[in-house]
Amino acid sequence: LNPQEIAERQFHYFPRSLTLPFPAPNSIAHWAFICDGTAFLFVHGFNGHATRTWDLFPGYLISNPVISNDTTNLKRADAIFYGYDSLTKQVWTNADRLYDLLRLMGTNPSDMVVNPTLSEESHRPPAFSYNRIILVSHSLGAVLCRKALLKAYRKKDLWLNKIALIQFAPADMGAHLPILLKEVMFPLLPTSILYGYVKLYAQVIFDVSVGSEPLKRLREDTLECLRNDPAAPLKARCVVHASDERVVVQDEFIPDEEMIRIDGKGHSEVCKPTKDYMKPLEILIEHS
Amino acid sequence: MVDIRTANLTDLDNHYGQILRRPSFLESLHNRPRDPKFITEQYLGRGSLAIQKLLRFYGIIEIACVANLLPSPLPQAFANKLIPSLHTPFILSLLKHDETSTLVPHLMDRLDGRGTTLELHPQPHLFIQFLSLDHSWHDDPLVSKFVSLLLDDQNDYYTFLLRSLQSESLAEQLTKDYELRTCLFSMERLLLAADDLLKFRRIVSEAPLLERAIGAYYRPLFSRLSQADEKIMKITSAMKKWYGDETDDFLRINSLRRFGSGWIALRKLSRQLEWGAQDEAILISDPALLQAVVDELEQSEPVLFREIADEIKEDFNIAIPHEQFLEPLPETSEEKEKKEPRRDLSQE
């Protein structure tokens, strides 16, 4: 590639921290230089990290030469890697904040989400809006997404129709606590100490344990909405489960559009593309 | 709408060029002495993080130029901002004695209109991914907190932490004590960050310019850590004792695997970022801990664990490169003693 061709392969501004009206730790946005109205919003899981959970996803999504050569519009899509306090804030708070972000993206993205992070000469016009928001979640993030979408449905938000949900190793049917603690929390600490800590400071974990009341209620409420309105846009486009899953319960939350099994991957790895494992990216392209 | 290269320049300037907007810093830059001895001390990161930030900014600008991500030539207004700081006697003298800032002379040539001899084109997507990685943890408050807790001699958090780890009532303390929790969780973040950086170094092997620069960018952090490496080792030893308390085999192995790989990452980074040999020697001077990790992993069924065990063993047989900009300090008798068990381990 000559220098000109190299430069022509940059389709996004350099990454920048997201500034929102509420805390969103480590959130990173890759704004497309020319956006066609598509946005990917990534939501990590319990004790995850805005970008680390997705590992090489940001690089593959926005600038992998192989991808940029294909016919998809990834090069013209925004990508937001959203971070939240998944330890000390409970599911309701985090889901409500995610709802707020989706509402901002669905109603007034220029003024409230994109432009505050861009220099003035790069601002998008006030009339800019998203046509599609692909909500990609992992583990606990899936619970937040389900809850946020349910709230949007109940509030009759019009932007809900723009959302497409893709879930990796969702914890919406519950997680096995001891393994969750060790697998995705603090592997350096013995279980007895972890339990002591989470009892006092990370109650969120009890919200997603197997058989928890909040999860049961979320499922019942979602199913009820679907019974009353089978066309309600609450189903996931795709739910991805790992064959070596040990953390979350693999079962159907609601009759989603598609469930996929990926062999040879565990809970944490299933959402992380690598040079030899491009399936997560292919799923996004196929279902977005 | 501005073109993307101009936008890139504004972004980099806003994010990394803050240091040049501090009048007091610029003034101090002009007043700094040119004595090579003084510069060496500064260079080692024991003094001026501000200088490291400045060199980092220059380096990032130069790489972005080489990758053709910035306007060419650089706008005069921007060049005018950089040139005064680049041409201070201190920086000029620093560059003569300092081998890590290899990108800066190229930037100077570029700004002086002499062109640059660099022909390596780092792939833009790698540079952008590096910026993303950098955003996500370079200024991670927990990592910074861990380093400052260890180095804060005034409050001596280190003694407090070590005592807590050795205490019978650790679980109880952990639920009550904010500093203790912060310190432990920060340490884990540090290990994860080291793991990230190591992984990224593998990825950027196709962009040697970027690979070479990363060592310089992250030296201040690891240089600061190297001041606390003995303390880190004592903390890890205390953690090892914990593992004896864990009865669940799966959790025990899993913990050890995660800890082992994180710890290896930190140690590998220390070598790849070319710390002094004495730092490496200290970091790997706990053969009992290392042996425990290897034993545990070798007995594990999943192949991955055994691979990590092999990796550890292999590492211990690799001679430490001595191409550092620093001449290795003469070994003290204490260091020699610490190295002995290493040889024992490799023989096994």
Image (tube, helix red, strand yellow):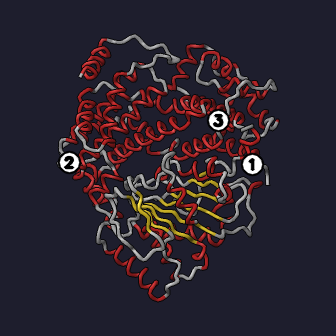
Question: Along the horizontal axis of the image, is B109 left or right of B186?
Answer: right
Quadrant, the N terminus of chain B: bottom right
Chain under numbered label 2: B
* Badge 3 and badge 2 in a common chain: yes
- Foreground residue among B309 and A257: A257
Tell me where residue B208 appears, x and y as whole percent: 60, 30
- Foreground residue among B92 and B293: B293
Mark 3: few, some, or many residues within 10 Å (few <14, many ≥20)?
A: many
Q: CA distance from mark 3 to mark 1?
A: 18 Å
Three-letter residue code for mark 1: Ile
Three-letter residue code for mark 3: Pro
Question: In the rendered image, which residue does mark 2 sit on?
Answer: B249
Query: Which is nearer the N-term, disc 3 or disc 1?
Result: 1
Query: Which is nearer the N-term, disc 2 or disc 1?
Result: 1
- Foreground residue among B96 and B72: B72
Chain under numbered label 3: B
Question: In the rendered image, which residue does mark 1 sit on?
Answer: B4
Secondary element type, mark 2: helix
* Badge 2 and badge 1 in a common chain: yes
* Badge 3 and badge 1 in a common chain: yes
